[in-house]
Amino acid sequence: MAEDDFDQGEAVMKVADRLAAEALIVDVDGFEGPLDLLLTLSRTQKVDLRKISVLQLAQQYLAFVERAKALRLELAADYLVMAAWLAFLKSRLLLPPDPAEDGPSGEEMAAHLAFQLERLQAMRDCAARLMGRDRLGRDFFARGIPEDVMRRRKVHYSATLLDLMQGYARIRTRDEFRPYVMDRDAIFTMEQALERMRGLIGFAGTWTDISSYLPDGFTTDSARRRSATASTFAASLELVKEGRVELRQAETFAPIELRRRDE
Amino acid sequence: MAEQERMIEAMLFASAAPLSTRDMAERMPHGCDPAEALVHLRKRYEGRGVRVAKVGDAWAMRTAPDLGYLMSRETVETRKLSRAAIETLAIIAYHQPVTRAEIEEIRGVSVSRGTVDQLLEMEWIRFGRRKMTPGRPVTFVVTQEFLDHFGLESARDLPGLKELRAAGLLENRPPPGTMPQPGEGGDVEESETAPGQNELFED
Amino acid sequence: MAEQERMIEAMLFASAAPLSTRDMAERMPHGCDPAEALVHLRKRYEGRGVRVAKVGDAWAMRTAPDLGYLMSRETVETRKLSRAAIETLAIIAYHQPVTRAEIEEIRGVSVSRGTVDQLLEMEWIRFGRRKMTPGRPVTFVVTQEFLDHFGLESARDLPGLKELRAAGLLENRPPPGTMPQPGEGGDVEESETAPGQNELFED
């Protein structure tokens, strides 16, 4: 591992970031997101992460992305988001600060990126140290014959938090699904409304309140009335669009009225 | 010899079955003498809370017989809580203080007296304040024992619906074919169910 | 005191899981002081093949790690953890209590729900107190099982914790301006679930 890094570092020193990018590209699926890729790229600088050149790193990353594009490799969107941000950071670092412009300076942004990389690296090191510790069941052991055998039978009921949450999820999801499966009778779809109205508008020679077009059985229950009102109104608009009827409303919240349009 | 004594001490402690001196010798580095180490180890544990006991022609560590009374509380049989009890408990935890009628409404089935009694006996739930509604029904709330058992600091730390989903606990999907199709009025349904659900999850 | 030392020796020996001083006191005759007896017992087992280990606020007998090679037959296969799971675990241990969003910020990628689920199932992490920030997100903390597994007395004894804190690497520094956040560009890991379905389950 260390040797690989060394070789990779050497190559970059000799040739260019572009080649390094090419070497990495082979492994593009092996990266756990843009920060991981940046961390790998940063190793080629061979300096303490606190002294890293973020500008150089940004250039390496952008070269990587360019190279991936040239090879027509599909990069996940978050890699491209990071590329855009790094391009922005690069311009901030290179150009003299514009006093009129708000927001953090390029140095602040670079410092935060360096902090993130250092923190991620620290967590990786910690994870490795943790997994390398003496572990129960591998390096040290618990009692092989625990003596908590049942002599006096006292029943103790147990449940884990997972059981509890799954139980709750079970009840909640049952409710969630009920509407999809069972409450369809409370729904009057726009297709149904349109079909119903097409049959009825022939008789609408005078202005008629569209609420009178609600189907039987959909006027008393509030959920059903709401659904039928919405679909009937939507269907009326559709009919206006088709040039078959006219709509009018005297004022806000007044009844909406409909009349057949004679060609 | 001190090192060999350590070895057999560790093996006898961790082994799931009694070990013969031959078993021990097989595991130990070549040239060790478990029989002799055993003599030392037995001596060391004389009069202690644990002793090295002979079981057939093998050896095992056992608690001293005079301390058996200390083990009596560990002789418990652990059983899984029934599904009804878990669901009832979950509803109390998430909706407390909650009346029996409310639990039944949420579960969609009646709650047996035994279930509530069991949870009360386990001291995971207790009676809360009476509700100021007709009949002044009693309510149920969860106890400190409940929080301790489930490793929670307060009932407010129970994960919500969104987090249950994120943890992969809401896997149920409606059976295929019952999913609303685009343009079939699916949007209407969704917006109608949403407020009611949120309500239940208000902190 | 010698008698009390025998008692806790027997209890700790008999139990595979760690026992708190409270657990022990409950089983001992009235007026006993397991905490003091523990000090003696711990000393007695220093350098032996078995030792008295502190696990969070509980105690357990465990074999000495240098003798692990004798116990190959007792070895339990732990489920192989993915790199993502190991890193997530380390972040929870060192930054606890930590929210999912904070884990994602540190790793720079979204955390798949399978990863958290796996760690919950292994009982190495649990839900902690909710954060007092908008949305009151749940947090994750490590468990006693975690400490037991990795032979830690407490989460404060995690290797390198002090150095990390001194270096400011455990601080939660808000990014200046608009840093790209994980998941912004469509997360790869979570994409197994059809987007249409997710939508339907949104609160």
Image: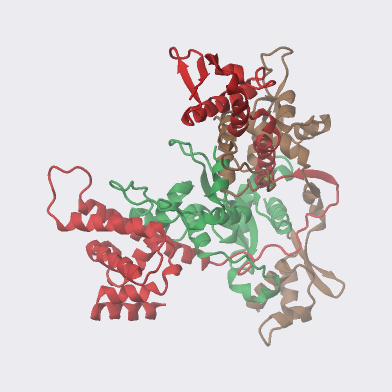
Chain colours: A red, B brown, C green
List the single residue furthest toward the right.
B56
- Numbered marks: total: 0
Please name the residue shown 23% across and 66% down the image.
A56
Q: Is residue C24 above or below residue B94?
A: below
**Residue A24 percent location from the top left of the image:** 37, 73
C52 to the left or right of B63: left
Residue C39 appears anywhere in the view: no
**Residue at the farthest front position:** A263
Q: Nearer the viewer, residue B113 or A197?
A: A197
Q: Is residue B158 above or below residue B8?
A: above
Kindly give the residue lying farthest to the bottom in the view shown: B31
Foreground of the two, A170 or C150 = A170
Residue C114 sits in quarter: bottom right
**Which sits in the foreground, B128 or C26?**
B128
In this view, the residue in front, B197 or C139, is B197
Instruction: Name the residue at 66% across, 79% down.
Output: B1
Q: Position of residue A184 (x, y in %)?
A: 68, 33
The structure residue drawn at horizontal position 61% and vertical position 32%, both measured from the top left corner, is A189
Q: Is residue C86 something one can see in this rendering?
A: yes
Q: Residue at x 46, y 15 (%)?
A: A249
In the rendered image, which quarter contains the C terminus of chain C?
A: top right
Q: Is residue B71 left or right of residue C147?
A: right
Location of residue A176 (image quadrant): top right
Residue A251 drawn above or below residue C143: above
The x, y position of residue A95, in whole percent, is 14, 55
A176 on left or right of B137: left
Give the x, y percent position of residue B155: 60, 34
